[in-house]
Amino acid sequence: GTPIILDCDPGHDDAIAILLAASHPSIDLLALTTVAGNQTLEKCTLNARRVCTVAGISVPIAVGASGPLSGELHVAAEIHGESGLDGPSWPAPSVDVVSEPAVELMRRVLLSHPAPVTLVPTGPLTNVAALLTTYPEVLPRIGEIVLMGGSTGRGNVRPYAEFNSWVDPEAAAIVFASGLPVTMVGLNTSHQALVTPEVVARLEALGTPVASMCVELMTFFASAYSAVEGFPAPPLHDPITLARVISPALVRCVPAYVSVETAGEFTRGATVVDFGNRTGLEPNAQVAMELDVEGFFDLIVESVASYG
Ligand code: BDR
Ligand code: CA
Protein backbone atom coordinates (compact mmCIF):
# COMPACT_ATOMS: atom_id res chain seq x y z
CA GLY A 1 0.00 0.00 0.00
CA THR A 2 0.89 3.69 -0.18
CA PRO A 3 3.16 4.56 2.76
CA ILE A 4 1.72 7.45 4.74
CA ILE A 5 2.17 9.43 7.93
CA LEU A 6 -1.12 10.70 9.38
CA ASP A 7 -0.70 13.99 11.24
CA CYS A 8 -3.86 14.69 13.22
CA ASP A 9 -5.65 16.51 16.06
CA PRO A 10 -8.37 14.04 17.09
CA GLY A 11 -11.20 15.24 16.85
CA HIS A 12 -14.23 13.17 15.78
CA ASP A 13 -13.49 13.13 12.06
CA ASP A 14 -9.76 12.62 12.73
CA ALA A 15 -10.71 9.52 14.75
CA ILE A 16 -12.47 8.02 11.72
CA ALA A 17 -9.45 8.97 9.60
CA ILE A 18 -7.22 6.97 11.97
CA LEU A 19 -9.50 3.93 11.59
CA LEU A 20 -9.49 4.19 7.79
CA ALA A 21 -5.72 4.75 7.54
CA ALA A 22 -4.91 1.82 9.82
CA SER A 23 -7.27 -0.66 8.17
CA HIS A 24 -7.24 -0.13 4.44
CA PRO A 25 -5.09 -2.63 2.50
CA SER A 26 -3.90 0.01 0.03
CA ILE A 27 -2.46 2.16 2.82
CA ASP A 28 0.66 1.41 4.82
CA LEU A 29 0.33 3.58 7.93
CA LEU A 30 3.91 4.21 9.11
CA ALA A 31 3.15 6.58 11.99
CA LEU A 32 0.61 8.82 13.64
CA THR A 33 1.69 12.26 14.79
CA THR A 34 -0.37 14.63 16.91
CA VAL A 35 -0.77 18.39 16.83
CA ALA A 36 -2.75 20.91 18.86
CA GLY A 37 -5.93 22.03 17.11
CA ASN A 38 -9.36 20.73 17.95
CA GLN A 39 -8.15 20.61 21.53
CA THR A 40 -4.85 21.06 23.37
CA LEU A 41 -1.92 18.87 22.38
CA GLU A 42 -2.30 16.79 25.56
CA LYS A 43 -5.96 16.08 24.84
CA CYS A 44 -5.47 15.34 21.13
CA THR A 45 -2.61 12.97 21.95
CA LEU A 46 -4.66 11.18 24.60
CA ASN A 47 -7.45 10.87 22.03
CA ALA A 48 -5.16 9.28 19.44
CA ARG A 49 -4.13 6.74 22.10
CA ARG A 50 -7.77 6.12 23.01
CA VAL A 51 -8.82 5.41 19.42
CA CYS A 52 -5.83 3.11 18.87
CA THR A 53 -6.60 1.30 22.11
CA VAL A 54 -10.26 0.62 21.30
CA ALA A 55 -9.45 -0.41 17.72
CA GLY A 56 -6.33 -2.42 18.58
CA ILE A 57 -4.17 -0.32 16.28
CA SER A 58 -0.47 -0.65 16.84
CA VAL A 59 1.52 2.10 15.16
CA PRO A 60 4.08 4.58 16.53
CA ILE A 61 2.34 7.68 17.90
CA ALA A 62 4.57 10.76 18.23
CA VAL A 63 3.73 14.02 19.95
CA GLY A 64 3.96 17.23 17.93
CA ALA A 65 3.46 20.97 18.35
CA SER A 66 1.48 22.42 21.25
CA GLY A 67 0.45 25.51 19.35
CA PRO A 68 0.78 27.39 16.07
CA LEU A 69 4.04 28.81 14.68
CA SER A 70 2.85 32.24 15.73
CA GLY A 71 0.23 33.45 18.18
CA GLU A 72 -2.15 31.67 20.53
CA LEU A 73 -3.83 28.29 20.05
CA HIS A 74 -7.57 28.36 19.32
CA VAL A 75 -9.41 25.08 19.98
CA ALA A 76 -12.80 23.83 18.74
CA ALA A 77 -14.46 22.80 22.00
CA GLU A 78 -17.96 23.70 20.74
CA ILE A 79 -17.64 21.12 17.96
CA HIS A 80 -15.50 18.39 19.58
CA GLY A 81 -16.25 18.88 23.29
CA GLU A 82 -14.03 19.56 26.30
CA SER A 83 -12.08 16.32 25.74
CA GLY A 84 -11.78 16.89 21.98
CA LEU A 85 -13.48 13.53 21.54
CA ASP A 86 -16.69 13.79 23.54
CA GLY A 87 -19.34 11.09 23.26
CA PRO A 88 -17.97 7.65 24.15
CA SER A 89 -16.87 6.77 27.68
CA TRP A 90 -13.24 5.90 27.09
CA PRO A 91 -11.35 3.06 28.77
CA ALA A 92 -7.86 3.88 30.07
CA PRO A 93 -5.59 3.78 27.00
CA SER A 94 -3.21 0.84 26.82
CA VAL A 95 -1.04 2.17 24.02
CA ASP A 96 1.58 4.82 24.68
CA VAL A 97 3.44 7.41 22.65
CA VAL A 98 7.04 7.03 21.50
CA SER A 99 9.70 9.26 23.07
CA GLU A 100 10.79 10.81 19.76
CA PRO A 101 9.00 14.12 18.98
CA ALA A 102 6.73 14.16 15.91
CA VAL A 103 9.02 16.18 13.63
CA GLU A 104 12.04 13.99 14.48
CA LEU A 105 10.06 10.83 13.85
CA MET A 106 8.74 12.19 10.55
CA ARG A 107 12.27 13.05 9.46
CA ARG A 108 13.65 9.63 10.42
CA VAL A 109 10.81 7.73 8.74
CA LEU A 110 11.06 9.83 5.57
CA LEU A 111 14.83 9.40 5.29
CA SER A 112 14.78 5.68 6.01
CA HIS A 113 11.72 4.49 4.10
CA PRO A 114 12.67 2.94 0.74
CA ALA A 115 9.91 4.75 -1.17
CA PRO A 116 8.62 8.35 -1.00
CA VAL A 117 6.02 8.80 1.75
CA THR A 118 2.70 10.64 1.52
CA LEU A 119 1.94 13.07 4.35
CA VAL A 120 -1.72 13.27 5.33
CA PRO A 121 -2.31 16.21 7.68
CA THR A 122 -5.83 16.52 9.11
CA GLY A 123 -5.16 19.27 11.65
CA PRO A 124 -3.32 22.60 11.67
CA LEU A 125 -0.14 22.34 9.55
CA THR A 126 2.28 23.27 12.35
CA ASN A 127 4.20 19.97 12.45
CA VAL A 128 4.49 19.70 8.68
CA ALA A 129 5.70 23.30 8.30
CA ALA A 130 8.25 22.78 11.09
CA LEU A 131 9.45 19.61 9.36
CA LEU A 132 9.88 21.32 5.96
CA THR A 133 11.71 24.34 7.36
CA THR A 134 13.89 22.51 9.89
CA TYR A 135 14.81 19.53 7.71
CA PRO A 136 14.63 20.56 4.02
CA GLU A 137 16.57 17.38 3.16
CA VAL A 138 13.29 15.44 3.57
CA LEU A 139 11.54 17.27 0.71
CA PRO A 140 12.58 14.77 -2.00
CA ARG A 141 11.38 11.93 0.25
CA ILE A 142 7.81 13.28 0.41
CA GLY A 143 5.68 11.84 -2.39
CA GLU A 144 2.83 14.27 -1.84
CA ILE A 145 0.87 16.07 0.85
CA VAL A 146 -2.86 15.39 0.92
CA LEU A 147 -4.33 17.70 3.52
CA MET A 148 -7.67 18.64 5.00
CA GLY A 149 -7.89 22.40 5.29
CA GLY A 150 -8.99 25.56 3.59
CA SER A 151 -11.95 26.24 1.39
CA THR A 152 -12.57 27.52 -2.13
CA GLY A 153 -15.30 29.76 -0.72
CA ARG A 154 -16.48 30.62 2.75
CA GLY A 155 -14.95 29.48 6.03
CA ASN A 156 -16.30 27.82 9.14
CA VAL A 157 -14.57 29.71 12.00
CA ARG A 158 -14.23 33.04 10.21
CA PRO A 159 -16.20 34.27 7.20
CA TYR A 160 -13.38 33.22 4.85
CA ALA A 161 -11.24 30.91 6.98
CA GLU A 162 -11.51 27.20 7.64
CA PHE A 163 -10.44 26.00 11.11
CA ASN A 164 -7.14 24.23 10.29
CA SER A 165 -5.80 27.05 8.11
CA TRP A 166 -7.06 29.68 10.57
CA VAL A 167 -5.35 28.06 13.58
CA ASP A 168 -1.95 28.19 11.85
CA PRO A 169 -1.99 30.33 8.69
CA GLU A 170 1.81 30.74 8.62
CA ALA A 171 2.21 26.95 8.60
CA ALA A 172 -0.38 26.55 5.85
CA ALA A 173 1.38 29.22 3.78
CA ILE A 174 4.69 27.33 4.11
CA VAL A 175 3.10 24.07 2.98
CA PHE A 176 1.40 25.56 -0.09
CA ALA A 177 4.61 27.39 -1.04
CA SER A 178 6.80 24.31 -0.54
CA GLY A 179 6.89 23.26 -4.19
CA LEU A 180 5.73 19.77 -3.17
CA PRO A 181 2.63 18.24 -4.78
CA VAL A 182 -0.21 19.32 -2.48
CA THR A 183 -3.83 18.21 -2.58
CA MET A 184 -6.22 20.44 -0.66
CA VAL A 185 -9.44 18.90 0.63
CA GLY A 186 -11.35 21.93 1.84
CA LEU A 187 -14.80 22.70 3.19
CA ASN A 188 -16.27 23.09 -0.30
CA THR A 189 -15.79 19.32 -0.66
CA SER A 190 -15.98 18.13 2.95
CA HIS A 191 -19.41 19.68 3.44
CA GLN A 192 -20.66 17.14 0.89
CA ALA A 193 -19.74 14.28 3.27
CA LEU A 194 -22.67 14.47 5.68
CA VAL A 195 -22.97 11.59 8.14
CA THR A 196 -26.71 11.09 7.75
CA PRO A 197 -28.84 8.95 10.09
CA GLU A 198 -28.71 6.28 7.33
CA VAL A 199 -24.91 6.17 7.57
CA VAL A 200 -25.10 5.99 11.38
CA ALA A 201 -27.61 3.12 11.06
CA ARG A 202 -25.20 1.20 8.79
CA LEU A 203 -22.48 1.60 11.42
CA GLU A 204 -24.82 0.62 14.24
CA ALA A 205 -25.84 -2.55 12.37
CA LEU A 206 -22.22 -3.75 12.49
CA GLY A 207 -22.67 -4.28 16.23
CA THR A 208 -18.96 -4.30 17.14
CA PRO A 209 -17.10 -2.30 19.82
CA VAL A 210 -15.37 -0.16 17.18
CA ALA A 211 -18.70 0.46 15.44
CA SER A 212 -20.29 1.50 18.76
CA MET A 213 -17.40 3.90 19.35
CA CYS A 214 -18.07 5.41 15.91
CA VAL A 215 -21.81 5.66 16.54
CA GLU A 216 -21.21 7.42 19.87
CA LEU A 217 -18.71 9.77 18.23
CA MET A 218 -21.02 10.57 15.32
CA THR A 219 -24.00 11.11 17.62
CA PHE A 220 -22.09 13.75 19.61
CA PHE A 221 -20.71 15.27 16.38
CA ALA A 222 -24.23 15.47 14.92
CA SER A 223 -25.64 17.31 17.92
CA ALA A 224 -22.71 19.74 18.00
CA TYR A 225 -22.97 20.51 14.27
CA SER A 226 -26.71 20.92 14.60
CA ALA A 227 -26.44 23.27 17.59
CA VAL A 228 -23.46 25.35 16.41
CA GLU A 229 -23.78 25.34 12.61
CA GLY A 230 -27.41 24.38 12.04
CA PHE A 231 -26.29 21.46 9.87
CA PRO A 232 -28.77 18.60 9.27
CA ALA A 233 -25.87 16.13 9.73
CA PRO A 234 -22.16 16.52 10.53
CA PRO A 235 -19.53 16.67 7.77
CA LEU A 236 -16.84 13.97 7.90
CA HIS A 237 -14.00 16.23 6.71
CA ASP A 238 -10.75 14.46 7.49
CA PRO A 239 -11.14 10.91 6.05
CA ILE A 240 -11.71 12.40 2.58
CA THR A 241 -7.92 12.89 2.37
CA LEU A 242 -7.46 9.13 2.75
CA ALA A 243 -10.26 8.37 0.30
CA ARG A 244 -8.27 10.44 -2.22
CA VAL A 245 -5.10 8.41 -1.51
CA ILE A 246 -6.95 5.08 -1.63
CA SER A 247 -9.12 5.73 -4.65
CA PRO A 248 -8.39 9.05 -6.40
CA ALA A 249 -11.55 8.88 -8.54
CA LEU A 250 -13.67 9.32 -5.39
CA VAL A 251 -12.46 12.92 -5.07
CA ARG A 252 -12.50 15.02 -8.22
CA CYS A 253 -9.80 17.70 -8.13
CA VAL A 254 -8.74 20.63 -10.29
CA PRO A 255 -5.28 22.24 -10.38
CA ALA A 256 -5.04 25.82 -9.08
CA TYR A 257 -2.65 28.22 -7.43
CA VAL A 258 -3.50 28.49 -3.74
CA SER A 259 -2.12 31.15 -1.42
CA VAL A 260 -2.90 31.54 2.27
CA GLU A 261 -3.81 34.93 3.68
CA THR A 262 -1.66 35.66 6.73
CA ALA A 263 -1.96 39.44 6.93
CA GLY A 264 -5.60 40.17 6.16
CA GLU A 265 -7.41 42.18 8.79
CA PHE A 266 -10.62 40.19 8.30
CA THR A 267 -9.39 37.26 6.22
CA ARG A 268 -6.43 35.77 8.10
CA GLY A 269 -6.31 32.03 7.38
CA ALA A 270 -8.28 32.27 4.15
CA THR A 271 -7.12 30.05 1.29
CA VAL A 272 -7.20 32.13 -1.89
CA VAL A 273 -7.82 29.68 -4.74
CA ASP A 274 -6.97 31.09 -8.16
CA PHE A 275 -9.56 29.53 -10.44
CA GLY A 276 -9.17 30.85 -13.95
CA ASN A 277 -5.48 31.64 -13.39
CA ARG A 278 -5.98 35.36 -12.67
CA THR A 279 -2.50 35.58 -11.11
CA GLY A 280 -0.75 33.83 -13.98
CA LEU A 281 1.03 31.67 -11.40
CA GLU A 282 1.54 27.95 -12.05
CA PRO A 283 -0.88 25.75 -10.05
CA ASN A 284 0.70 24.60 -6.78
CA ALA A 285 -2.16 22.35 -5.68
CA GLN A 286 -4.84 19.94 -6.71
CA VAL A 287 -8.01 21.35 -5.19
CA ALA A 288 -10.79 18.92 -4.27
CA MET A 289 -14.11 19.93 -5.78
CA GLU A 290 -16.48 16.99 -5.72
CA LEU A 291 -16.86 13.84 -3.63
CA ASP A 292 -18.43 10.54 -4.66
CA VAL A 293 -20.49 10.53 -1.47
CA GLU A 294 -21.84 7.00 -1.80
CA GLY A 295 -18.43 5.52 -2.62
CA PHE A 296 -16.90 7.45 0.27
CA PHE A 297 -19.32 6.18 2.88
CA ASP A 298 -19.03 2.63 1.52
CA LEU A 299 -15.30 2.95 2.19
CA ILE A 300 -15.94 4.24 5.73
CA VAL A 301 -18.44 1.49 6.60
CA GLU A 302 -16.16 -1.21 5.15
CA SER A 303 -13.27 0.15 7.16
CA VAL A 304 -15.19 0.12 10.43
CA ALA A 305 -16.53 -3.37 9.60
CA SER A 306 -12.98 -4.65 9.10
CA TYR A 307 -12.29 -4.21 12.83
CA GLY A 308 -14.61 -7.17 13.54
C1 BDR B 1 -11.42 20.69 10.33
O1 BDR B 1 -11.40 21.26 11.64
C2 BDR B 1 -11.56 20.27 12.61
O2 BDR B 1 -12.55 20.61 13.52
C3 BDR B 1 -11.88 18.98 11.88
O3 BDR B 1 -11.27 17.89 12.53
C4 BDR B 1 -11.32 19.19 10.50
O4 BDR B 1 -9.97 18.79 10.42
C5 BDR B 1 -12.65 21.18 9.61
O5 BDR B 1 -12.63 22.58 9.50
CA1 CA C 1 -8.89 17.48 12.17
Image (cartoon, rainbow, N blue to C red):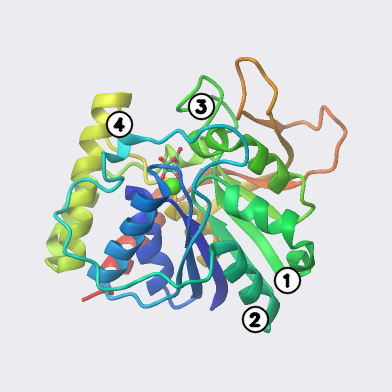
The residue that label 1 is drawn on is: 141
The residue that label 4 is drawn on is: 78
Question: Ligand 1 near label 3 (Cβ, under 8 Å)?
Answer: no
Any mark on residue 199, and which? none
What's the CA distance linking mark 3 and mark 4? 16 Å
Task: Classify mark 3: residues with Cα within 10 Å, few (<14), some (14-19) or many (20+).
Answer: many
As shown in the figure, which amino acid type bears the numbered disc 2?
A: His
Question: Ligand 2 near label 1 (Cβ, under 8 Å)?
Answer: no
Q: Earlier in the sequence, mark 2 or mark 3?
A: 2
Please identify the quarter of the rendering in which residue 74 is found.
top left
Name the image quarter holding the C terminus.
bottom left
Q: Nearer the viewer, residue 286 or 213?
A: 213
Any mark on residue 155, and which? 3
As shown in the figure, which amino acid type bears the numbered disc 3?
A: Gly
Please identify the quarter of the rendering in which residue 86 is found.
top left
Residue 63 placement (x, y as % from top left): 47, 61
Judge depth for marks 3 and 4 and give the one in front.
4
As shown in the figure, which amino acid type bears the numbered disc 1?
A: Arg
Residue 53 versus residue 173 in the image, above or below: below
